[in-house]
Image (tube, grey):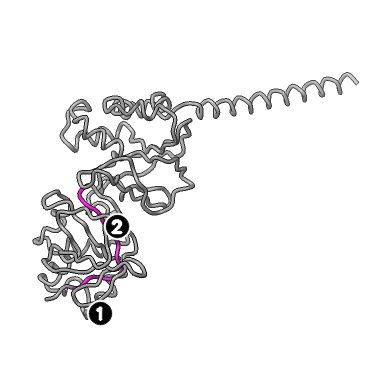
Amino acid sequence: MKTIKIKLIALLALIAFTGISCNNDDDDDDAQQSQTIVTIAKANPNLSSLVAALEKADLATTLNSSGSYTVFAPDNTAFSAFLSANGYANLNAVPVAALKELLLNHVLSTKVKSTDIATGYVKTLAKGSASASNTLSMYLEKGSGVAINGGKTNGGATVTTADIEASNGIIHVVDGVIGLPTIVNHAVANKNFATLVAALSYNSASGFVGVLSGTTNSPFTVFAPTNTAFTSFLTETGFSGLPVIPANVLETTLKYHVVTGANVQSTALTNGQVVNTFASQNFTIGLTGGAKITDTNNRISNIIATDVQCSNGIIHVIDKVLLPKF
């Protein structure tokens, strides 16, 4: 009888200990979720550069207040690489205005867990020089992990630690400082534009990549054909590939997809609008039955996605290559 009582007492003690242990784990989770994004970042030694940057740019107060944010948080190594690559001796050497926009480019206004991320575009809180109102787009690619704007080699980053919960949102630690993406950065990031990128860079003498990466003649509005659109274009024109297209034909065709000096959002497009392009040839916008473009050869291309905002312009996606007159 005594043995049974001892065993019963031991069992009750074990149950009590297990309950306390589980409650402690729950308390730890609750404690973290009661902390703000800034508080959690301050407690992480690997995010000390981010905290210093947020304080310098006067954004710590924002991310310490109530809200529902997603922060892609560069670690200290990422900040060191950013400073070195841009010739800054330290964080204090970065102009405050530039630093603020850079940091806002890491923040979404909604809480997005890694399980909610799908390949596609989201909007950050940053603004480039192309638009005073339309915030910059970010391209997320979901695979075995999450790549942002094409990864570090394209001015983006990759998520290394996901889903750090906070009271006012969520943190995903990343391995790079995410730059303000240009038209070329966004084109490179999205694999659906691989042929367009190849066409832009095929003839280096044309300087297209440099032009659409910079601000001269900006902002730009680019009507960007998909890979499928280019495949159809090659079939239609009888060219076996980009290498056999005469340089002047390829250059004029690419220029025909670009408008200079204007960041034209989809809301500014009107039915029957005549658009003058970088090729000095026009095409016409139609909105009946969906947004579309009629080129100078009376071919129709559908606008299938709009308003990918870049730092130096905007991209609208089309399903057919536009053909100018030659």
Q: Which mark is residue 319?
A: none
- Callout 2 secondary element: helix
Placement of the N terminus among the 4 image quadrants: top right
Q: Is residue 274 above or below residue 141?
A: below
On the image, the x and y values in percent for residue 49 come to 30, 28
Quadrant of the image occupied by residue 323: bottom left
Assess disc 1: are there few (<14), some (14-19) or many (≥20) residues with their C-alpha within 10 Å of its C-alpha: few
- Callout 1 secondary element: helix
**Which residue carries the number 2 mark?**
266
The residue segment tinted magenta is: 312-323
On the image, the x and y values in percent for residue 234 come to 24, 76
Tag in front: 2 or 1: 2
Q: Is residue 145 above or below residue 303?
A: above
Taking the magenta stretch, the answer to whether it contains residue 227 is no
Assess disc 2: are there few (<14), some (14-19) or many (≥20) residues with their C-alpha within 10 Å of its C-alpha: some
**Which residue carries the number 1 mark?**
236
On the image, the x and y values in percent for residue 173 come to 38, 37
Q: Earlier in the sequence, mark 2 or mark 1?
A: 1
In the foreground, 302 or 49? 302
With 190 as the anchor, is 144 left or right in this view?
right
Taking the magenta stretch, the answer to whether it contains residue 320 is yes
Measuring 36% from the left and 35% from the top, which residue is drawn there? 73
Is the residue under label 1 in contact with that under label 2 (CB below 8 Å)?
Answer: no
On the image, the x and y values in percent for residue 191 come to 32, 59
Q: Amino acid at mark 1?
A: Glu
Placement of the C terminus among the 4 image quadrants: bottom left
Measuring 39% from the left and 48% from the top, which residue is drawn there? 146
Q: Is residue 51 above or below residue 189?
A: above
